[in-house]
Amino acid sequence: MRLLPRSAKGTWLLAAAVWMGGCAGMWWLIPLRPRAVMTVPGDNSVLGVSPGGKAVTLMGRGAEEGDRVPVRVWDTVAGSLRTVVSEKDVQATCAQSPDGRWLAVGVGPVDREGGVNRLRILDLTTGSEDELAGPDGAPRWYELAVFSPDSRWLAVAEHERAAAPGTNQPGVRLWDLEAHRAGVSLPTARPTFTFSPDGRRLAGEVWLEDATNNGGFETVLWDTATGRELAHLPTPRFLNVVALAPDGTALIGEYREIEPVLPAPMEYACWNFVGGQKRWSVPNGERLFAVVGGSRLMGHRHDATAGTKDVVVLDAADGREVGRMTLGKKVCLTNAGPDGQTIFVVTPHPLGLDAVWVWLAAHGVLWPQSMSDCHLELLDTVTGRRLLTLPDGNAAFAPDGQSFAFISDERPGTVELWDTPPRKPLTWFALAAAILTLLLAGLTWRRSRRLRREVA
């Protein structure tokens, strides 16, 4: 053929080019696969993922609120599944520590206001267990549990049992996980609290009924170890407190001024505890996540000029924008990786056959119906590149951001563990590359030998 080189050197160069192109094509065609897959009975949600994706904690989802559901731990290395809380216990609260070691589960008969009188604290690595509980009839019940970022402290919403419904007095109890003992009690704190990134401080709301505050809320900063009040912040309520500033001296969250007629647009705001002044604010915010140990913030903002929704990365210290990624008009941020390298967005377009069902429904054919009208996309925050496309479901990142667990709404009994970014199956690629190498090497050697003979 005239297109083929007429020299041995040119033939080998062409073979090398074909080999590289073939390997690139095979790498592109090989589908992404999860690192591990487990079939779990029942409808489940992901409660937490340990660092490195070594274990995934799953909690069952009942058909109705208050249903008895089990809590299971999937060992992704050994491929085993064990139940740590049986269906005999009713959970009013359930949380896992960031390091994947501790599990807090409120169990026992549900109180008339939704709480329980026992809180089990399980060490998932050793199997040991502690318990926050009182004797029968004790004036106490538990509703909410939050772990500190360093996984040392557990803050528990603790209520005094009142004579009449709706008159209970809230509070917060701290539990020292390493020492296996109860810490200080903050009787005036409400069950909305946030730890500093180092776990040394705790911020929460208290209700004051005095003339200076007109019976409003005030945010208080406590020392976690001693319970000593460090500062007060008499500001309007945050819609959602996201984090404390890295130095622990300011509160960051989603905030909105209350106006007489119409509420103002929501913004991201940072308020100093000392002086009560707003340190910085960013308008038109919708969702906000703390990433990179609380030193960065990742938010979802609406750009009114362009009509798009952007993902912005902010410096938590001064609110300065250090990164931006533009999304589509109907694309929404749903979750951000703790390392700030990846995000999950939901797009209003179904996958596979669901797209066909939606198209048929739009043209008057009402059967069959689609399982979902949207899907999830995993995006790289630096390049904006789409790393993975998944059906709509429940995804939870590991604390190191290097893996995540996923349960599809279409297959609630199947749990998948993915690496971030997702990895290709190298075994199949290596086998295909070896076959292509042998084939090209044989053909090139035969043609090169024939060309040498012709020249001779």
Image (spheres, grey):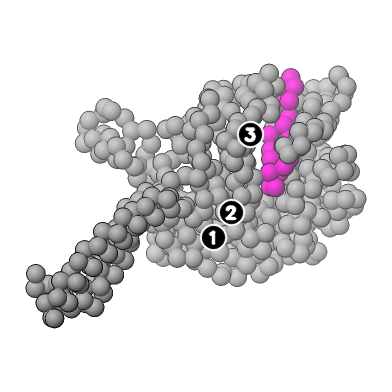
Check disc 1 and report the residue beneath it. 341
Image depth: mark 1 or mark 3 in front: 3
Q: Is residue 102 visible?
A: yes
Distance from disc 1 to disc 3, alpha carbons, whole Å, reads: 27 Å
Distance from disc 2 to disc 3, alpha carbons, whole Å, reads: 19 Å
Check disc 3 and report the residue beneath it. 73
Seen from the viewer's position, the closer of residues 93 and 431 is: 431
Query: Could you say where residue 105 lies in the image, as x and y percent from the top left?
Result: 72, 32
Q: Quadrant of residue 140?
A: top right
Q: Is residue 105 magenta?
A: yes
Say which element carries label 3.
Answer: strand
Say which element carries label 2.
Answer: loop
Instruction: Mark 2 or mark 3: name the one nearer the start of the chain.
Output: 3
Question: Taking 428 as reference, is 365 left or right?
Answer: left
Query: Could you say where residue 381 lies in the image, as x and y percent from the top left?
Result: 49, 62
- Residue located 24% across and 62% down the image: 442
Seen from the viewer's position, the closer of residues 261 and 391 is: 391
Q: Quadrant of residue 125?
A: top right
Check disc 2 and report the residue beneath it. 401
